[in-house]
Image: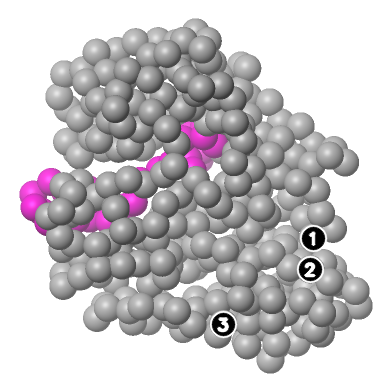
Amino acid sequence: MRPFVYDRAATIDRAVQLGAHTASGQADAPVQFLAGGTTVLDLMKLDVMTPQTVIDITPLKPSLRTIETGPAGLRLGAGVTMAEAAGHDGVRTQYPVIADSLKLAASAQIRNMATLGGNVLQRTRCGYYRDPSWSRCNKRVPGSGCEALTGPNRNHAVLGVSKACIAQYPGDFAVALVALEAQVEVDGPDGRRTLPFEAVHRGPDQPHIEHSLKPGELITGFFVPPGAWTRSSLYLKIRDRASYEFAIASAAVALDLDGDVVRDVRIGLGGMAYRPWRAREAEALLKGEPLSEDAAEAAARAALKGAVTHEDNAYKPELGRRTLVRALLEAARMEA
């Protein structure tokens, strides 16, 4: 780990002021925020991230550690830990897809440390990005190329990719948020703003620019609107081993049925996409129709229709389809 300046921010305004002293808000920014630290510190040890200044925002946690549930929806402070959100009674009963996505992520120790704000901005687990000995990585060295296109790529993305990058977004919580049409609350040098969570993560054309936050902006919270579909929701995660492993395919499904007819449905896909992925084509096929296994399979084919595979990850579209079918049928049984 390289030397860096350590600073602490006691207020949001102070954090924003310190964070604004950079021309970039991305992974290569010379100033980085530190909350749980479970991603930033890992990448600093690997010499992938080399910030000049690290701003510790843990003093802000009490003000950012609120969970509110009610008729108006769900509000989660960015300083809430993964374990706190997963174990909250209101989240577990009213928004089980969120509780599932957090409970199935990482280890108990990491869930006790990692914050929700940092979790959604976690960086890819692509080995070519995380190992500086690989010279070709457009995320780490813009314009250098993508080693994964021709190297081993079993766990790389098949949705939302480009010739510039096929890295897979590794998170689970973000997949649930994108399915539920969450909003993210941000404080920055220009004040507070709210934006759709789906707009936070950018596409792969400029891989080194991963998100739409401006320099100095800090995620302070998340809002999930209410809906008849939130209670009958789940997160299904398929991985190579039963615990402490990243998804190779996952589905966040929230379902509202009238008998067996789909009134509304929300679908997010993980483990297969460059960024948290909303499967709108699949949703459109299901709405207004009876939910049968055939209907679920047709929706799953639509969801994976645009998949782009490479040699080692050619199995992923079929696995993704089966994962989504299973998730839809399991969510339907929650309403029965």
Q: Position of residue 140 (x, y in %)?
A: 20, 46
Q: CA distance from mark 1 to mark 2?
A: 7 Å
At horizontal 42% and vertical 70% (from top left) the residue drawn is 159
In the picture as drawn, the residue positioned furthest to the front comes out as 190
Please, is residue 229 above or below residue 224 in the view? below
Which kind of residue does numbered mark 3 sit on?
Answer: Ala
Q: CA distance from mark 1 to mark 3?
A: 21 Å
Percent position of residue 270, x then y: 49, 62
Q: Crowding near pointer 2: few (<14 within 10 Å), some, many (20+)?
A: some
Q: Is residue 68 left or right of residue 81?
A: right
On-image quarter of the N terminus: top left
Which mark sits nearer the N-terminus, 3 or 2? 2
Residue 297, by quadrant, is bottom right
Disc nearest the viewer among 1 and 3: 3
**How far apart are the two marked residues, 3 and 2, measured between alpha carbons?**
17 Å
| Residue located beneath label 2 in the image | 264
Q: Which residue is mark 1?
A: 229
Region of the chain picked out in magenta, as a range: 107-136
Image location of residue 268, percent across then percent down: 59, 63
Residue 287 visible within the image: yes
Q: Quadrant of the C terminus?
A: bottom right
The residue positioned farthest toward the bottom in the image shown: 294
Choose mark 1 or mark 2, whichever is in front: 2
The residue that disc 3 covers is 302
> Horizontal and vertical percent for residue 150?
16, 72
Residue shown at the point (56%, 82%) measured from the top left: 302
**240 within the magenta span:** no
* Contact flag, marks 1 and 2 (Cβ < 8 Å): yes
Amino acid type indicated by mark 2: Asp
Question: Helix or strand or loop: what does disc 3 sit on?
Answer: helix
Q: Assign a secondary structure to mark 2.
A: strand
